[in-house]
């Protein structure tokens, strides 16, 4: 990641923080607070008056600080433009999965250098708005060579890579033969670069049986699982995600009471207060996509009230959500999905980390947690041009990012 760094400084203390929203297990919100960054880790946090000395001192001047956004669902490896499709949809045409083919053709046609530049530019754009940990999927290659290329490029530019060869059956391909390819040679080709696998279980994409085959092959290959589910109508996506103990099921626009209950039951052995136990399946809500496709917003309030852990993600992609603004997602969640500001920020930070299996870790185990602020966690901080996180919803559309630290380095 390029940007301003701490140079040769060993430690930095940020003082006079008006509101420090930790999103840690205690969900602390500290006033007149301070944070010490040491290398890539948070070394101390507490009252500003008690702040220890450090090599560098920064005065926050009453601004709010929260964890950097954790965007757990994006599709950054693409070329081309789908403005015409967007215009048609705004004029009343319904969304279908078929537009993915347009992006596939454009993506295949560009060089490695150009595709890398496009991904890198999108990451920089996201970081400039406070995102400090970022997942991206493949899925616009849709053949062995181009899926492997997409995975390799993504692995060099983002924090987590998800294999999505099961995004769409290419035109002219037999669905069963293509599913065999996804589960066999294509999976083998991407394995060195990916941690997760996903499947678009939806009408016009992959059936329940095909999705089950993809998830089984990915699990057998040692990958974590995710599911695109219940975006365009009620379907088997949520049930499959629960059956396979997937880390997340994403979209969840059309879910029944039975689906909500099934997701809630996956969290029965998780202790929220201590962050221990058996992690369930996160429901990832993608409000920017919902607005762009004119689908009903995911029922975030209902899911939280049922005991389901949720995440908010931008779903940056060229067809249905061409934005990397997590702040926009938080604002929408508060104003239209009936989440509190604290709940929405938590879903966009800790929730995203939970969906990626990165919510825990400290100095003892060396797997530094992201998505929350505590001693030993990765120093991912987002300072706002505002005295509190409430301004994210109170002043919708206003760019409020002041400064960003990513793994202890100042990026903005």
Image (cartoon, rainbow, N blue to C red):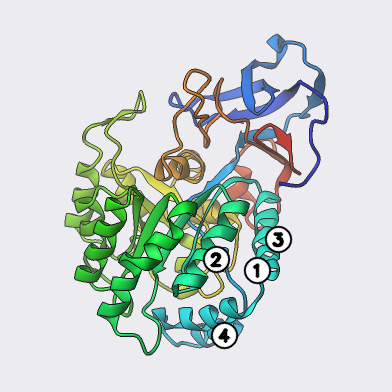
Marks 2 and 3, how far apart at CA: 18 Å
Q: Which label belongs to residue 149?
A: 2
Q: Quadrant of the C terminus?
A: top right
For marks 2 and 1, the one nearer the N-term is 1
User: Dot 4 corresponds to which residue?
Assistant: 87
Secondary structure beneath label 4: helix
User: What residue is disc 1 on?
Assistant: 112
Query: In front of the other: label 2 or label 4?
Result: 2
Q: Position of residue 394 (x, y in %)?
A: 61, 49
The residue wearing badge 3 is 121
Q: Residues within 10 Å of mark 4 (few under 14, many from 20)?
A: few
Q: Secondary structure at mark 3?
A: helix
Q: Is residue 250 visible?
A: yes
The image quadrant of residue 152 is bottom right
Q: Which one is closest to the eye, mark 4 or mark 1?
A: 1
- In the image, 29 versus 105, the foreground residue is 105
Of tags 3 and 1, which is closer to the observer?
1
Q: Nearer the viewer, mark 4 or mark 3?
A: 3
The reply to whether residue 232 is in sight is: no
């Amino acid at each position: 990641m390029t940007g301003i760094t701490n140079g040769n400084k060993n430690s930095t203390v940020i003082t006079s923080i008006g509101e420090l929203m930790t999103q840690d297990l205690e969900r602390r919100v500290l006033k007149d607070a301070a944070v010490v960054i040491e290398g890539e880790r948070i070394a101390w946090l507490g009252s500003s008056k008690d702040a220890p000395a450090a090599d560098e001192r920064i005065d926050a001047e009453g601004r709010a600080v929260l964890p950097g956004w954790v965007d757990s669902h994006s599709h950054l490896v693409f070329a081309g433009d789908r403005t015409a499709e967007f215009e048609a949809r705004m004029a009343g045409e319904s969304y279908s999965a078929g537009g993915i083919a347009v992006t596939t053709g454009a993506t295949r046609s560009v060089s490695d250098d150009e595709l890398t530049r496009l991904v890198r530019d999108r990451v920089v754009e996201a970081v400039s708005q406070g995102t400090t940990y970022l997942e991206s999927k493949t899925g616009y290659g849709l053949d062995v060579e181009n899926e492997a290329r997409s995975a390799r490029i993504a692995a060099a530019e983002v924090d987590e890579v998800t294999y999505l060869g099961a995004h769409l059956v290419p035109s002219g391909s037999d669905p069963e033969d293509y599913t065999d390819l996804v589960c066999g040679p294509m999976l083998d080709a991407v394995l060195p670069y990916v941690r997760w696998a996903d499947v678009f279980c939806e009408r016009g994409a992959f059936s329940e049986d095909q999705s089950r085959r993809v998830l089984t092959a990915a699990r057998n290959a040692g990958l974590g699982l995710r599911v695109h589910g219940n975006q365009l109508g009620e379907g088997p996506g949520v049930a499959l995600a629960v059956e396979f103990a997937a880390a997340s099921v994403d979209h969840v626009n059309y879910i029944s009471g039975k689906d909500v209950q099934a997701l809630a039951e996956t969290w029965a052995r998780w202790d929220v207060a201590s962050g221990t136990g058996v992690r369930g399946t996160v429901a990832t809500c993608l409000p920017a996509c919902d607005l762009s496709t004119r689908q009903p917003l995911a029922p975030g309030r209902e899911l939280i009230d049922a005991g389901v852990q949720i995440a908010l993600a931008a779903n940056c992609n060229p067809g249905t959500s061409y934005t990397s603004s997590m702040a926009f997602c938080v604002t929408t969640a508060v104003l239209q999905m009936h989440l509190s500001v604290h709940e929405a920020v938590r879903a966009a930070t800790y929730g995203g980390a939970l969906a990626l299996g990165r919510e825990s870790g400290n100095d003892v185990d060396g797997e530094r947690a992201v998505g929350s602020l505590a001693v030993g966690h990765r120093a991912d901080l987002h300072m706002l041009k505002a005295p509190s996180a409430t301004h994210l919803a109170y002043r919708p559309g206003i760019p409020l990012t002041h400064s960003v630290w990513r793994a202890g380095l100042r990026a903005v």
